Structure formats: C-alpha cells, structure tokens
Amino acid sequence: MRIRSRDGLIVVDIQKDFCPGGSLSVDRGDRVVPVINRLIPKFSHVFLSRDWHPPNHCSFSHSPKFVDKSWPVHCVAGSPGAEFHPLLSIPELAIVIDKGVDPDREAYSAFEETNLAKFLRDRGIDRIFVAGLATDYCVKSTVLDALNQGFETFLVQDACRGVDNPPGSVDKAIEEMKESGASPVRSEVFE
C-alpha cells in the first residue's frame, strides 16, 4: 500500500501510564512502539493524541476495585505518567492533540472536543491510519469518529494493543470498526 501526501497517521495515547509500569497499563502496550516508529517516517502528517487530564477528572475512581466503571488516576496533565513513551520517535512537525481536558467529561476519541478534524481538513487529508492504545477504548472511539467525520479510515492492527476487559472486547471492537467501514491493515503492507 502506497502512502500518499494526503494521508495522515493518528497515534493514540502512547503514554507512560498506558505502558507497563504505568497506573493504567495495557498488557505489553510498549510493544507497539517499534511498529509505530517504523510507520512514522512514511507519513508527512503525524498526529499524536494524549490523555491530558486535570487532577480532578471525572473518570478517576473513588472505588478501589473500580466497580463504578471508572479508572485509576492516570495521565494527569504535566505528570510523568502523561509523558509519551520515551522510545516513541516524535517527528518535529507532529501535532499533539490533548484530550480529556474537561474535568467533567470522559473523552476517549482523539476527535472529541478537539480540533483534530479541522487540522486534518486544513491539510487536505482524506485518508487516515490509526495506531496506538487501547484498541477497545480510545483507538476504537477515534476510528469510529473518523468514519463519522467522513475520513477513509484504516486500523493498523499490529500497531495497536487492547485492554481486553472484559475478555473478548478487543475482537468485538475490531469487528465493530470493520462493520462501521474501517479497513484493518498490518504495518508490513506499507511501501
């Protein structure tokens, strides 16, 4: 598959808190970093989303067992856990998209309450490729929103990892993305 000048790569949430040792780590989440690093130089347009929560964000749990569908404190703006993974190769011209900044709203998608769609359209981008963490949450939401915004959308499957809780949620998310119009690809198909 040939990458065109009107293609964009969206890298979702490759942050320390989502990698091993982080407060909300995705199992082997750091294994996508080398795959993403091989993809990045192929694209003229790279967008990096990151959770950038205030300390009092509504998604943070007040229940130690997280039974209320909330999460451990993670990716607090300016904290070490909110930093991108240290081995992620960030291009000089990459655009960083902060999400989850409103303390009263959860935002899984890189499009939700951000200017991402405008950034893409302003650059004439009509085809996007999505990679990152986690397949069954923020990646899925980003892919579905991209499709709803009218972008031709590809999920780079080997450049994603999921939480898979409950078990089977990653497969279910991939199926939902495919049924909605996303095309799954693997990183080795790129020229």
Image: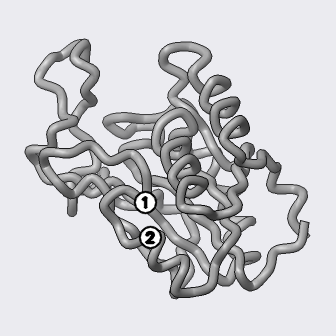
Residue 5 is marked as: none
Q: Is residue 128 above or below residue 33?
A: below
Provide the residue designation for mark 2.
116
Task: Residue 34: give x, y in percent of width and height.
Answer: 68, 57
Residue at position x 51%, y 79% in the image:
94
In terms of depth relative to the viewer, which is nearer, 167 or 143? 143
10 Å crowding of disc 1: few (<14), some (14-19), many (20+): many
First-in-chain label (2 vs 1) = 1
Residue 111 is marked as: 1
Q: Quadrant of residue 29?
A: top right
Residue at position x 17%, y 54% in the image:
102
Tell me: 36 left or right of 185: left
Amino acid at pointer 1: Phe
Tell me: 86 left or right of 130: left
| In contact (CB < 8 Å): disc 2 and disc 1 | yes
Cα–Cα span, label 2 and label 1 = 6 Å
Q: Secondary structure at mark 2?
A: helix
Task: Residue 36: give x, y in percent of width and height.
Answer: 66, 59
Q: Secondary structure at mark 1?
A: loop
Amino acid at pointer 2: Leu
Q: Quadrant of the C terminus?
A: bottom right
Tell me: 2 left or right of 49: right
Residue at position x 73%, y 66% in the image:
39
Tell me: 15 left or right of 171: left
Q: Quadrant of residue 121?
A: bottom right
Q: Is residue 157 above or below residue 153?
A: above
Residue at position x 53%, y 33% in the image:
136
